[in-house]
Image (cartoon, rainbow, N blue to C red):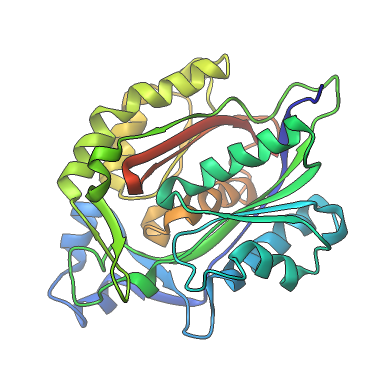
Amino acid sequence: MHHGSRITAVGHYQPARVLTNEDLTAMVDTSDEWIRSRVGIRSRRIAGPDEPVDELAGHAAAKALASAGLTPADVDMVVVATSTAIDRSPNTAARVAARLGIPGPAALDLNVVCAGFTHALATADHAVRAGSATRALVIGADKMSEVTDWTDRTTCVLVGDGAGAAVVEACAPEEEAGIGPVLWGSVPEMGNAVRIEGTPPRFAQEGQSVYRWATTRLPAIARQACERAGLQPADLAAVVLHQANLRIIEPLAAKIGAVNAVVARDVVESGNTSAASIPLALSKLVERGELSTGDPALLFGFGGNLSYAGQVVRCP
């Protein structure tokens, strides 16, 4: 009955404050060389105490809407992927809708931690295909600084804050779908490998377990996401993996076999921004002109819950 959907615009936002590796050496026992050699991060952006996660999300969404040439009234669904919203209700999506003046959308938050954006994108694509939405704003936004123990040198060097957004619209009947079938799943029995738990909530992880899982189990799953889209890895123009750690991104991208693709390495500048990382990195590639309209890009999120979700999308 209904046709596929496509991404018509993207946008991103990062807070102004830059926290460099040098800055971190004054806070915990670490060094620039240690951080860069192990995770590849040079700097990250940190939101202020008066900059809640829905504000980050709202800025990114407003940019995506403007880029699409749409008004808030054109949107009938808002899906926000986040795991760092402090309040339960109103949810982040409702707050973004209120900030932007979107009248009456379906407004839902989705918490799949670092795989959140690709789950949210699939959810919006399915809603459009089912005919229950026509234009969706899909946002990944996280304020990891708020759930981080800044005395723990194993985790505090990793995190950053930010948001990225995509406008998802129905394709015309004759158009090819611009969002491929999602491949998603999880490893629940290993869910404790990445945690944001407690009161106040704090981020912790078993880095070695996550590294092994990401570099050994995920390449085949990512290749399968390409197969579902009817493409070979060599056909990809871009690979945008969750920006967890450069030492995970580079081996994983190599094992996928996307030999002609630009590999997003935004983690170097932005750190691990959880659900924000994929749309943030994609939006920057589009903004810099490194990708052309219609280019196939693999988006692949993975992490918390040991969940994963990936799909091939056509660039706006």
Where does the image place residue 219, in percent across and percent down from the top left? 34, 26
The C terminus: image quadrant: top right
Please tell me whether residue 8 is drawn above or below residue 311 in the rendered image: below
Where does the image place residue 128, in percent across and percent down from the top left? 74, 36
Please tell me whether residue 35 is drawn above or below residue 152 in the rendered image: above
The answer to whether residue 90 shows anywhere in this view is yes
The N terminus: image quadrant: top right
**Which residue reaches farthest bottom?**
50
Q: Is residue 206 left or right of residue 104?
A: left
Please tell me whether residue 12 is drawn above or below residue 58 in the rendered image: above
Q: Is residue 197 left or right of residue 145?
A: left
The answer to which quarter of the image holds residue 21 is bottom left
Q: Residue at x 44, y 70 (%)?
A: 45
Q: Nearer the viewer, residue 208 or 289?
A: 208
Q: Residue at x 47, y 25 (%)?
A: 260
Q: Is residue 125 left or right of residue 309?
A: right
